[in-house]
Amino acid sequence: MNFVRTFTLGIILLATTIAAQSKDYSVVSWNVENWGSSDPAQIAVQLRDHFDQIDIFGLSEVNRDSDFALYADYASRDEDGTYHVIAGTTGNNIKLGIIFKENKFELLDTFELTDLQFGSGGRAPLVANFRDKENDQQFLFVVNHLHRGNEKKRLSQAIGLREWARMQSLPIIAVGDYNFDYDVDLNVGNVAFDAFVDQGIFEWLMPETLVATNWSDTKPADGQNDYNSVLDFIFVSGADIDGVSTIFVRDNDFPDDEYTSDHRPVVALLTVDGSEVLGDLDNFTPLRPADRSRELAVFSMQPRTVQSGVKNLPFDQKLEFDNSRIVETFSTDQMQTIQSQLNDLKNQIQNLQNAQ
């Protein structure tokens, strides 16, 4: 009898733990910087190989809508569901985007805060209103990329976003590249950072260990990072939010090269309903032994529609890969060799079928 009671209690405790963990939301903020010096193929493979069971990705500096589709497709591989894409419309060739688990969240609304763009080169904050399909919890998810070269515009964006958040009744998760120049050694940010966290509207989910999130080597080009600062953040707003975050450092991520991003991802695990965070961040960032980046070009030789469920919201445009990606990854001679090998394989398969 005692065994039965103990076993039953164990099942109840296990079910309670699983239910509680289901309220944890795993979030990634990453400036993938594929508009100029990173390869979308490499970024896509890293989304597949370096992250597991991420609920929402907030991405910045994405060049093309087809790249969003590529990222959603590869992030979905080895996962328990596909991702939907919300592609921002501002920022020219450095757009914002959200990729989220469609089996976990219902998208109730999405919009851009165009009043906070401040010029055609700026990015309007991209907002999504999600509902948790399991428990009906609603929250707002915001991706930001504040101005880099114009301090006044950056300050105006920070104040404007803070005041917008003040008027919201739902919990807010706000991620992105804020260009707040938070100095790791001095523990101070720039004036826009001070304004953003002023009055306690937003709270920084400050990682326990701070390291530089951006690589820059121009002053001079000596193989050393010019700045030891944090540009990428995850902020929250709302009395019931609890969370932890980490700056995701991977082997050989800095210095970056022509294939990789010059930003490190920031990963967070949080709840928005007042419950305690029970999960472990390490479970969401496996470091697999090898990237398989070159395989992507082979997959991309024949354009194909993205997995079902991936679409560009709110504009409802179906996204497809484009042929140009093969040029970005392989030379013409390499592609001809690969094509010849694929043709030989196709002929072998056809011969086997005919022999049956």
Image (spheres, rainbow, N blue to C red):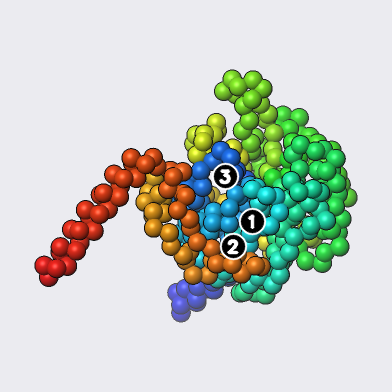
Question: Disc 3 designates what residue?
Answer: 34
1 or 2: tag closer to the N-terminus: 2
Image quadrant in which you'd find residue 201 = bottom right
Question: Disc 1 designates what residue?
Answer: 97
CA neighbours of label 1 inside 10 A, class few (<14), some (14 to 19), many (20+): many
Quadrant containing the C terminus is bottom left
Is residue 100 visible to us here?
A: no
Amino acid type at mark 1: Gly
Left/right of residue 185 with respect to residue 98 in the rendered view:
right
Amino acid type at mark 3: Asn
* Residue found farthest to the left: 355
Find residue 323 and report its horizontal and vertical position in percent. 45, 53
Question: Disc 2 designates what residue?
Answer: 85
Which residue does the image show at 66% across and 37% down from the upper left? 210
Q: Are marks 1 and 2 in contact (CB under 8 Å)?
A: yes
The residue closer to the viewer here, 91 or 30, is 91
Amino acid type at mark 2: Val
